[in-house]
Amino acid sequence: MKLKSMPSLRAKKRYVVFKLHTEDELSYANVRNAVYGSLEEWLGQKEMAVADVRLIQNLWNPKSHTGFIRCGHQHADAVSMGLALVHQIGDSKVAFQTVGVAGTIKSGKRKLEHARY
């Protein structure tokens, strides 16, 4: 039997929607390693565990270079800043642009549709 926590005790989630500007095709694994490495340097291991950072694999689009990162609602700004610190993935020069922060995946997809880049 699995114990569930009360809704009032659960952490609130936010989705940081980002666009990766690069000319090269990048795999999910390379992007994940770069994002987690940068966030670990910026936040530290303890704060990264508290923020509960996850790069969502199903929502990574390698053609348009867009993706979603799930985190706690109090750490969304720190995650956006950690993304901005990534300048290179492998041999490719990259720039992360935070499109927005959303409370649900559906509203995050809407932000991607209406974003101008």
Image (cartoon, rainbow, N blue to C red):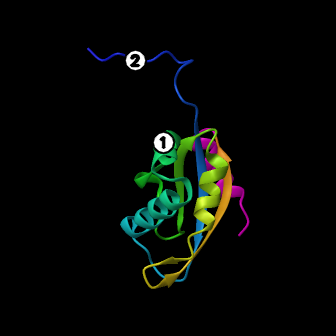
Magenta stretch encompasses residue 113: yes
Q: Quadrant of residue 97?
A: bottom right
Which residue is located at x 52 percent, y 58 percent? 39
> Which residue lies at the image location 63% right of the left edge and 52% below the top edge?
78
Residue 114 in the image: above or below residue 85: above
Q: Say which amino acid is labelled 1.
A: Asp
Within 10 Å of the Cα at label 1, are there few (<14), some (14-19), or many (20+) other Cα atoms?
A: some
Task: Compare residues 11 and 102 and report the one nearer the observer.
Answer: 11
All told, the count of numbered labels is 2
| Secondary element at tag 2 | loop
Q: Residue 87: horizontal and vertical position, in percent?
A: 57, 76
Q: Left or right of 3: which side holds 99?
A: right
Q: CA distance from mark 2 to mark 1?
A: 18 Å
Which picture quadrant has residue 64? bottom right
Question: Horizontal and vertical percent for residue 46?
Answer: 47, 45
The range drawn in magenta is 103-117
Where residue 28 is drawn, which disc sits there? none
Quadrant in the picture for the C terminus = bottom right
Q: Is residue 22 above or below residue 16?
A: below
Instruction: From the image, tell me which residue sits under label 1.
Output: 52
In screen coordinates, is 43 left or right of 84? left
Residue 107, magenta (yes or no): yes
In this rendering, the answer to whether 112 lies above or below 62 is above
Mark 2 highlights which residue?
4
Q: Are marks 2 and 1 in contact (CB under 8 Å)?
A: no
Q: Quadrant of the N terminus?
A: top left
Q: Residue 80's spot in the image, x, y percent?
A: 63, 56
Looking at the magenta stretch, what is its main secondary structure? helix
In terms of depth relative to the viewer, which is nearer, 34 or 26?
Answer: 34
